[in-house]
Amino acid sequence: MIDKTILSLKEAIIKIKDGDTVMIGGFGNAGQPAELIQALIEHGAENLTIISNNAGNGYHGLAALLKSGKVKKMICSFPRQHDSYVFDELYLAGNIELELVPQGNLACRIEATGSGLGAIFTPTGYGTSLAEGKETREINGKHYVLEYPLRADVALIKAYKGDRWGNLVYRKAGRNFGPIMAMAAEITIAQVQETLLLGDLDPEHIITPGIFVQHVVQV
Amino acid sequence: MSYITRSQAEMAQAVAIDIQEGSYVNLGIGLPTQIANYLPNDKDYFLHSENGLLGMGPAPDEIEEDEDLINAGKQYVTLLRGGSYFHHGDSFAMMRGGHIDLCVLGAYQVAANGDLANWHTGKEGAIPAVGGAMDLAIGAKKVYVMMTHQTKSGHAKIVKSLTFPVTGLGCINRIYTEFATIDIADEGLKVIDMVKGMSQEDLQAITDAPLIFS
């Protein structure tokens, strides 16, 4: 019998090694897997590259991860917030690397990995400093930039409900990057509010089919 | 030589009047979000939020605030009956794939050919952040800018060519400022509306690119 649900966050987080690339879901606080992030901080893996839309708010969650000194590099679209104190300090002191990626490119490069594509051409960023040094091509009279997939060893995502086959549904705007990061990472760990029996999730409404998910943990 | 400039609310109203019922619209963070307040309640407009909402509604009462229901600026919102949620891949497919009819953005500068600068001031050591700005700029069918006509230190923001880092090339269709509404047409910058009492010379004096008056 296959049961992807696990009882402790530690059990799954232990797979994250020094130097790993970790995708973390969320848009601001919405859909940010706070409990998984806390477990990661406690686990202590270092020199991490984090792929997420933002770089933390206040001193909790992703900001706490950055503050713990375990993050070498952020790959994100919008690190600067009114309360991005932790990132700002690290960045201005030269203590964290930043790869700035337009949000749509972040999304489609993550989708490309999950979908097995080798590369994509996107019009976003053409003619801007974020396309510097990249190959461009004119296709049907429009200019595109060649971008490569973003891969990760682990994805930490926050879903709403899941079952033992790893099927997931999300909650409102907490969905955001969850479904595409789930597809992309080698190992996807999803925290959920509730685990359900098989069949309780309507097949018509499953947002992430369990094929993409390795571990589900109720918090 | 006295004229009354448009307030932010009046600028927002001016843009709202120009939005057709049934339009799929993305309102950028900052000034443009006010436009939603002036869209008539008895008509259907579809507000898209980059973080995965279509049919975004107004701000909720405090008691209804939900951490999972926020807009691109991380403010609490509601979802209208008929609204939907989707993930980031689909959200940006809507934007990049030309499905959004109109996007209204703020700007640091707009060039006479429609080039947009709104994501970076170019200041040495500034912490960069881009979000969905570049995707919106090149993806929407029409892109309007809502901004002050000049910087706080009195420099023109409508320029011959950008001196600030580019967000998108040739992507802006219309500019709304506190003084005027200006179309970016093939012929150049066409002034289609101007506040009462302002002369053509006054407006040209604060704009760093040639204006065409009808």
Image (cartoon, helix red, strand yellow):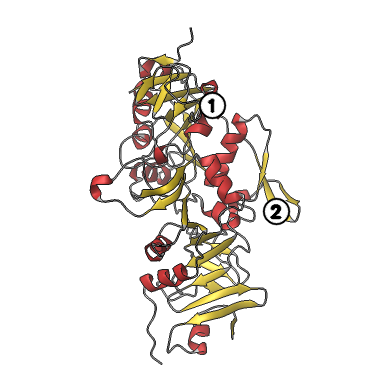
User: Which amino acid type is marked by label 1?
Assistant: Ala
Give above or below for B158 relative to B200.
above
Q: Position of residue B3 (x, y in %)?
A: 39, 87
Residue drawn at x 41%, y 68% as measured from the top left? B12
Q: Does residue A166 appear to the left or right of A57 in the view shown? A: right
Callout 1 secondary element: loop
**Quadrant location of the C terminus of chain B in the rendered image:** bottom right
Q: Position of residue B10 (x, y in %)?
A: 39, 73
Residue furthest front in the image: B42
What's the CA distance linking mark 2 and mark 1? Answer: 30 Å
Disc 1: CA contacts within 10 A as few (<14), some (14-19) or many (>=20): many
Q: Position of residue A60 (x, y in %)?
A: 31, 36
Residue drawn at x 56%, y 58% as measured from the top left? B101
Foreground: A92 or A135?
Answer: A135
Callout 2 secondary element: strand
Marker disc for residue A185: 1
Give above or below for A25 relative to B128.
above
Residue drawn at x 54%, y 60% as measured from the top left? B102
The answer as to whether the residues below labels 2 and 1 share one chain is yes
Q: Position of residue A111 (x, y in %)?
A: 58, 35
User: Which amino acid type is marked by label 2?
Assistant: His
Residue furthest bottom in the image: B1
Disc 2: CA contacts within 10 A as few (<14), some (14-19) or many (>=20): some
Subunit of label 2: A
Foreground: A19 or A6?
Answer: A6
Subunit of label 1: A
Question: Which picture quadrant has residue B171?
Answer: bottom right
Marker disc for residue A143: 2
Give above or below for B166 relative to A103.
below
**Quadrant location of the N terminus of chain B in the rendered image:** bottom left
